[in-house]
Amino acid sequence: MARTALVKIKPRRYKVGDIVTVASIIMHPMHTGLQKDKKTGKVIPAQYIQKIEVFYGDEKVTWMDVFPSVSANPYIAFNLKITKAAPLKIIWTENDGTKTEKTIQIKPKG
Amino acid sequence: MNRRNFLKVAGIATSVITVSPVLLKEQNSAKAQQQKRSYQEALKEITGGSPVKSSDKVKLIAPAIAENGAVVPVKITVNHPMEKDNYVKAIHILAKDNFEPRTLSAYLTPANGKAFISTRIRLAKTMDVVAIAELSDGTFLKAEKPVKVTIGGCG
């Protein structure tokens, strides 16, 4: 089940050589596996984003190990050096293998 | 023959009795390990025992008081080049007293341009947050900051 995810580049206009900030967010509750459902009393099983991979064109430029103590709806921002016009793809993988993908186009001006 | 058989069975029984508490203990201790991991263990997993030096090259920005332990914003910048053979390989964020001290490990490459990570983590209670920068030459630098938590973040 793919989840809603957003990727944004700040600033919106950039050229080759600039270092921009890539902000990503994915809607996910990040269940730690430690909490009990208040109504049923049963432990809510662990369900969380475990890995994030970032591809700029064909190259994997950044990857992350994510643990359940990251807040729900994980927001993660990092920098990217603009070198070319190419797709920027982010893949979020959950502990049960579910994947969500989001691609945006990097289009440097000038 | 009877005695031989008896001794054989006794021998097997004794070895089973001796071995089983060891096996059970391993199972139990594996379970105990799953329940809680210390900060030192998590740190060892990251550094493999290498020394970690505090450095003001690692800038850890986190609130002194977090109103909501479920959403604590954390920003880390490492003042270090990001060149082909000399760059920040990873930034690890640890919460010393959380059930699992590791929160995020971001592996960077020179393509990032700058060593920077911003995210939001959960803190179960007031504790130190640690940022560890792993450099491409194998050294580890860190910065620590205590964060007071009024409402805990893990439910």
Image (cartoon, coloured by chain):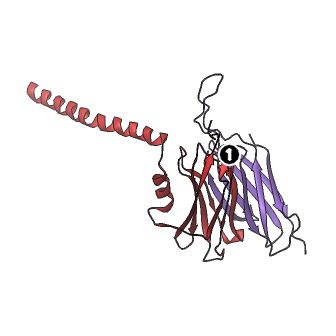
Chain colours: A purple, B red
Name the amino acid, label 1: Ser
Q: Where residue A87 appears, x then y in whole percent?
A: 81, 62
Q: Residue at x 49, y 62 (%)?
A: B47
- Judged from the image, the secondary structure of the residue bearing numbered disc 1 is loop
Q: Residue furthest top?
A: A40
The number of discs equals 1
Quadrant that contains the C terminus of chain A: bottom right
Image vertical order of residue B140 relative to residue B150, above or below: below
Q: Residue at x 70, y 43 (%)?
A: A72
Q: Left of A105 or right of it: where is B131? A: left
Q: Chain of mark 1?
A: A
Q: Residue A83: image x %, image y %?
A: 79, 73
* Quadrant in which the N terminus of chain A appears: top right
- Is residue A65 shown above or below A109? above
Q: Is residue A51 above or below residue B133?
A: above
Residue A103 image position (x, y, % from top left): 80, 56
User: Closest to the observer: B70 or B88?
Assistant: B70
Q: Compare residues B10 and B137 and report the one nearer the observer.
A: B137
The residue under the point 63% across, 22% down is A40
Q: Residue A79 placed where, x, y %? A: 74, 65
Count residues near mark 1 (Cα–Cα under 10 Å), then give few for <14, some for 14-19, many for 20+: many
* Residue position for label 1: A71
Residue A2 picture quarter: top right
Q: Which residue is nearer to you in this view: B143 or B103?
A: B143
* Residue B1 left/right relative to B59: left
Horizontal side of A94 relative to B102 (left or right) equals: right
Residue at 73% from the left image edge and 45% from the top image edge: A73
Image side of residue B41 versus residue A23, left or right: left
